[in-house]
Every structure is written in structure tokens, then in C-alpha cells.
Amino acid sequence: AQSVSQHNHHVILSEAASLELGCNYSYGGTVNLFWYVQYPGQHLQLLLKYFSGDPLVKGIKGFEAEFIKSKFSFNLRKPSVQWSDTAEYFCAVNALNNAGNMLTFGGGTRLMVKP
Amino acid sequence: SAVISQKPSRDICQRGTSLTIQCQVDSQVTMMFWYRQQPGQSLTLIATANQGSEATYESGFVIDKFPISRPNLTFSTLTVSNMSPEDSSIYLCSVEAGGYTFGSGTRLTVV
């Protein structure tokens, strides 16, 4: 079964700092990859997704992620964070050819941006 | 992408009672997924619900505790039975329709 690791559990940044959140997965086959964001008190929202094609994926709110197949990674980046980016970020993987077709989530990274 | 209406959005329940959570989707979907998000933790899949068949439960979750109904292709319910404080969590339903969409969640507190 696939697993997803997010290395940073808590990240604290000042506004305008650059952000990179790590995500690695364990599955040797074809995958679909996702980043979700959960703002305080709100439900999950999709930031971006990778299915195929250009491994550099651009999402909403200035976020992007790069799929590096050789490293089994899908790191999330933003060049300049804002206070409003304070939230919890979840990486998720859907392993194709998986009979269950469900998402497996990483443990989440809680980002706090100081104004 | 699909739109999911989930209710209730929150509830406070007495231990030993049961709560049924409903999810309505605005389009027909084959699979619906139920997740649990315990305080401060990530999402864990409880079960996958297909219309017309028994739900498939993940390790650590059983039908007696979390019975699921899937009467048609747009609707599903999850019941949390004989609740204890350890069941206090956010419960979410999800569908895969051109991308995974989640309901707004049900925040359950068991006292």
C-alpha cells in the first residue's frame, strides 16, 4: 500500500518569505498527486493536482508544485507567503491501478505566517 | 467538479448514542469515501461506499461501529454508533469526479 510523508510538521515564516513544503510518497507505479489546504475552521480545499504532462504544476493563490518521479516527491512552493496563507497543508496520493481508488494523505504541515 | 452537501456541520453528542451524517452529491458518482480527521491529525480513510454493495472498510474500522448506507448514486450516510469521547473528530465524505472533492465536514464532539 502507498504511504505519504510530509517532513515538516510545523513551519513558521515571516511574510514575504519563500515556502517549500516537502512531500514524498512510496509507490512504484503511476500516481496522481494533490495538495490540499485547510484554513482554520474551514474544510479542505484543493490547491493543485498533477495527473500527467508538465511536472511543474501551478495552482491557486500563487502556489506551485513539482513532481520529481525519480525522487518520489511532490514538493509545494510559493515564492512569497502572506499572512493569509496560515493554514494546514496536506499532500495526497492516488495510486493508479489501486483497486480502492482512494486518496492517501500525508500527516499535514501546519504553516504559520507572521505578519 | 462535484459539489457535496454534508450535514450536520457539527454536533455535540452524549456517549453511548449514535449520530448519522449525510452527504448529498450534485451528480452521480460511483464511489463515495468517508474519512476521519482526529484533532491535530491528518485524514484517515474509514471506508469506500459503492452503490448497491457493502462498503469496504479500512483496517481498524468495522461495520458495526461505522455502518454506511449508499442507497443511490448521489447519496450516502455514515453512522457513528455507540459513541465515546475517542470518536470526537471531523468526519468528511469525498467523491472522485474529475478530481477529489470533499464535503465541508461534520465536527463531532462526544461528551
Image (tube, coloured by chain):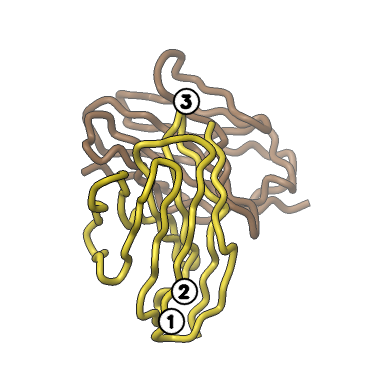
Chain colours: A brown, B yellow
Residue drawn at x 30%, y 71% as measured from the top left: B65
Residue A12 shows in this picture: no
Is residue B111 among what the camera can see? yes
Identity of the residue furthest to the top in this view: A53
Query: Image point 35% across, 41% down: which residue?
Result: B31
Q: Residue visible at 26% across and 38% down?
A: A26
Q: Amino acid at mark 3?
A: Glu
Checking the image for residue B88, the label placed there is 2
What amino acid is at disc 1?
Answer: Pro
Q: Amino acid at mark 2?
A: Ser
Left or right: residue B54 versus residue A12 is: left
Which residue corresponds to mark 3? Answer: A66
Q: Position of residue A18 (x, y in %)?
A: 64, 36
Residue B67 percent across, percent down from the top left = 31, 64
Q: Chain of mark 1?
A: B
Instruction: Give the CA distance from mark 1 to mark 2.
Output: 6 Å
